[in-house]
Amino acid sequence: AKHGTSIVGGDTQKAEEIAITGTAFGRVKEENLLLRSGAGVGDLICTTGEIGSAAAGFYCLTNKIDGYHGFIKRALEPRARLREGKILSKFASSCMDISDGLALSVHEIATQSGVGARIFEEKIPINHRLNEVARLTGVSLREMTLYKGGDFELLFTVAPDRFESVQTDMEKIGSPAAAIGEITEKNIRLVDEKGCETELAMRGWQAFS
């Protein structure tokens, strides 16, 4: 404000060290825009990749746990889902990254779209070794998959009759997509493996927290 400038973007954080951040701008055709709004009642809620792997990597690093190089690589060497985004631009009604956490991203899309959501916890795709890290660290699977964040994957919504086409195109590039829930009229809920339904906490990575 002092210099009459504006902050554009979300990378406004604080740290003890100096950090230099690059920003890239680009152009996209209007019909290929992926917005956080646009989800409609009845749409499937879906993700790319495996969820919770980056969080597992960070916990392995902070707890000095060896033997989980794959998780650590996911935490330290994230890959932007550019090819996946191009595919989704043809099908998705809404989309955003989930680096701040899956739960927070579900809330964001639901809020921006003026709808509710229901997430089925057992349908969230995870690496088969995530349970091992949960046992070693004492951190629950729910915490790693829903709230910790760090995954450079995409959360998107799509009409049920278009999801098979999404899966087919994703398989061609070796990047699976999973349906983990549905868009509802109101409320944002989580259904656990026993079928118990509760409110999905609006919690995840928060800058300056």
Image (cartoon, rainbow, N blue to C red):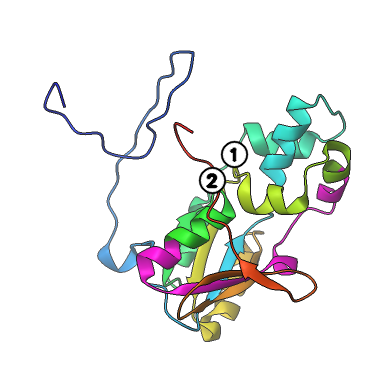
> Type of residue at label 1?
Pro
Badge 2 marks a residue whose secondary structure is loop
Magenta range? 109-132
- Residue 190 horizontal/vertical position (percent): 64, 68
Badge 1 marks a residue whose secondary structure is loop
**Is residue 125 shown in magenta?**
yes
Query: Spatial distance from mark 1 to mark 2, Cα to Cα?
Result: 10 Å
Q: Nearer the viewer, residue 90 or 75?
A: 75
Quarter location, residue 67: top right
Q: Nearer the viewer, residue 67 or 111?
A: 111
- Residue 204 horizontal/vertical position (percent): 55, 46
Write the residue at 44% across / 67% down. Answer: 110
Write the residue at 73% across / 74% down. Answer: 196
> Type of residue at label 2?
Ser
- Quadrant holding the N terminus: top left
As drawn, the residue found furthest toward the left would be 4
Q: Which residue is mark 1?
A: 78
